[in-house]
Structures are given as C-alpha cells and as structure tokens.
C-alpha cells in the first residue's frame, strides 16, 4: 500500500516505533505493513481500553457471549452480566495480550506462544472462537472510535486479528 506524501500519517511514520515486519513464511501473505502497524499502535487510545473506556473492555466480551452463546461454555464460573468483574478481568487480559502482540508485531507467534498453548492444550478452546472474538472486538473498537476507524484502520485491524487468530490456533495443527 503506497502512502501519499500529502497524508499527515505518512510524515509521522518516519518516527514510528513499529519495526519492519519480518513474519514467518506462513504469515507473509497476511503480514502487517509499517503503515498498518502505525494505525494499530496509535488508534485513539484503544490500548487504554484496559484502564477505562466507558465499558469497552466489558463490551466486546459481552457482545461475544450475547451474539455467540456457545462461547459461554468456557466460562461456567463467570458472572456474565454486563459490567461484571469477571468480564472486566478477562477483557483486560485479552486487550493486554493484543497490546503485547502489537508491541511484538515482528514476532507475534513468540509473544502469544504461552496463550496458544494454554488455549489449545489446557482450555481446549474451539479455534473458531478466536475469529468470533476478533469480529466482536472489531465491532466494539469501531463503535468506540468511529473517527479513527477508517477503512485503512479497519483493514489493519482485520489483518492483525487474523494473524493473531492464526497464531493462537497454530498448536491445534
């Protein structure tokens, strides 16, 4: 994707902390460009969602459970009502893991290796649930940050979450 010099974002890419992506061969077709990394890292405070964002952390998990009730089976001990401490705690963990993946964009597999093993071998989560969660997260981010969620940002998020889903299901193969 070529970035025009007239785009104010292109000028800030020179100082972008995001590394040039060097993804494993199986991710090359889905690799995140430096521009997309910049969009992910700097999108209107999304990474502050873990602290306080008007219920954003609880919202995407709640949307997942409301839209796809079969995902509740992995959380029989959770209070699944909107705003519950359980939803907040798990949402914070998910956002933190995604934040780590963005920080380690050149080694997402390494950043999420322990989570991949946990979900595959111990929790035995159905791999399709990662795609469902990705969709709910996209919808929630888009609704909380409509000005920042441009077509380019949507593409970057979609590509990034696809890579994360692939990494998390890697141990199932």
Image (cartoon, grey):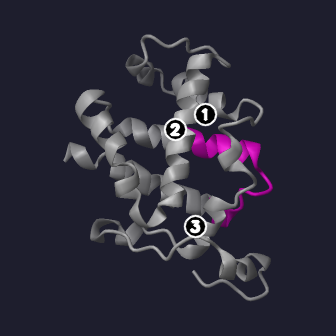
Q: Secondary structure at mark 1?
A: helix
Q: CA distance from mark 1 to mark 3?
A: 22 Å
Q: CA distance from mark 3 to mark 2?
A: 18 Å
- Name the residue at 73% across, 77% down: 12
Residue 60's tag is 1
For the residues bearing labels 3 and 2, Cβ distance under 8 angstroms: no
For the residues bearing labels 2 and 1, Cβ distance under 8 angstroms: yes
Task: Report the side of 118 relative to 158 (left or right).
Answer: left
Task: Report the side of 169 relative to 73 (left or right).
Answer: left
Q: Write down the residue under mark 3.
A: 37
- Name the residue at 76% across, 49% down: 145
Q: Is residue 101 magenta?
A: no
Closest to the observer, 111 or 173: 111
Residue 135 visible here: no
Magenta range is 135-153
- Is the N terminus in the top left, top right, bottom left or bottom right quadrant? bottom right
Residue 94's tag is 2
Question: In this figure, what is the number of numbered marks?
Answer: 3
Task: Report the side of 48 relative to 96 (left or right).
Answer: right
Foreground mark, 2 or 1, reads 2
């Amino acid at each position: 994707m070529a970035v025009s010099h007239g785009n104010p974002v292109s000028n800030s890419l020179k100082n972008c902390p995001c590394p040039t992506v060097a993804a494993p061969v199986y991710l090359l077709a889905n690799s995140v460009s430096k521009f997309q990394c910049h969009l992910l890292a700097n999108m209107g405070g999304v990474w502050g969602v873990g602290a306080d964002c008007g219920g954003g952390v609880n919202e995407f998990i709640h949307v997942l459970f409301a839209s796809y009730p079969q995902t509740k089976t992995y959380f029989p001990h959770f209070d699944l009502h909107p705003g519950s401490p359980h939803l907040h705690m798990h949402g914070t963990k998910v956002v933190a893991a995604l934040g780590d993946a963005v920080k380690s964009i050149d080694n997402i597999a390494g950043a999420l290796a322990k989570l991949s093993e946990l979900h595959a071998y111990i929790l035995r989560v159905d791999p399709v649930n990662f795609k469902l969660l990705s969709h709910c997260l996209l919808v929630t981010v888009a609704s909380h940050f409509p000005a920042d969620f441009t077509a380019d940002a949507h593409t970057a998020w979609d590509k990034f979450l696809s890579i994360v889903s692939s990494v998390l299901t890697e141990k199932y193969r």
